[in-house]
Image (cartoon, rainbow, N blue to C red):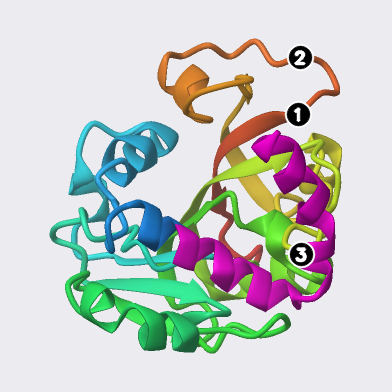
Amino acid sequence: MLELFKSILRKPYYFFFSKHEAELNYWRACYRKEGNTLDNSFYKPLMLAIAQEKNEDFAYDKVVADFGCGPRGTLSWLRGARQKIGIDVLVQEYQECFPDLLSTHNMTYVACSETRIPLPDESVDILFTINALDHVQNLKIMCHELLRILKPQALLIGSFNLNEAPRKTEPQCLTESLLRNTLFRDLKIISWRVSQVPKQGYRFQPFLDNDLTPPEGKVATLWAKATKSLPQNS
């Protein structure tokens, strides 16, 4: 009965909040649920698996960024990087809500907008993005921004929710075809793997178990690694 009541209230509840307010409320709920903290221990094995690397040596002396980082400290595990940058539209709100937590992450947090990432052209060597691109309002503009900040031969490494119905906090319905024709259109793809989403349990477990048998056209996760080509006149 309680679950039925929650399901009835869910849509009206989100109706009264903006997209960003709903996203921040999600993180506040996670913080309370996890005992006034936000666990980030799972990011190291997950990000290394997507990058197809055994350890963090590949990022040594590199500028590494994470787009749509949230407040968990997604790059805290990374050692030896020249700079670690978390990019998110809610950075100011995270700093107000979780100041003690963010100060422990050894990361530089940068607030972007829905149309601009305030980093110079060709300034990032490795760009992670974990299930964040479906959150953006304008897919074309933000794909351009992500490509703009990548150095030539930089790596883009990420996971992307596929075939999920749009909702307030995730207005984009991403498909493999759409991603190939936007974010990855001018990148050289190194790895392109798709896994199913389990009905229960850890969303990423099939990928970590190397179960890459996605249900055709159904909800799935794409795991991709690509590199930005050198300019043609180089």
Residue 4 colored in magenta in the image: yes
Q: Tell me what residue is drawn at x 54 percent, y 83 percent.
A: 121
Q: Earlier in the sequence, mark 3 or mark 1?
A: 3
| 148 to the left or right of 140 | left
In the rendered image, the quadrant that contains the C terminus is: bottom right
Residue type, mark 3 in image:
Tyr
Q: Earlier in the sequence, mark 2 or mark 3?
A: 3
Q: CA distance from mark 2 to mark 1?
A: 8 Å
- Range drawn in magenta: 1-29
- Of residue 213 and residue 119, the one placed in the foreground of this image is 213
Q: Going by the picture, which residue comes out furthest to the left? A: 80
Residue 13 has which mark? Answer: 3
Residue 122 colored in magenta in the image: no
Residue identified by numbered label 2: 215
| 33 to the left or right of 5 | left
Q: Residues within 10 Å of mark 1 (few under 14, many from 20)?
A: some
Residue type, mark 2 in image:
Pro
Which mark is nearer the camera, 3 or 1?
Answer: 3
Q: Position of residue 83 (x, y in %)?
A: 26, 74
Q: Position of residue 1 (x, y in %)?
A: 71, 33
Q: CA distance from mark 3 to mark 1?
A: 25 Å
- Of residue 169 and residue 83, the one placed in the foreground of this image is 169
- Disc 2 and disc 1 in contact, CB within 8 angstroms: yes
**Main SS of the magenta segment?**
helix
Q: CA distance from mark 2 to mark 3?
A: 32 Å
Residue type, mark 1 in image:
Val
Numbered disc 3: secondary structure = helix
Q: Position of residue 116 (x, y in %)?
A: 66, 85
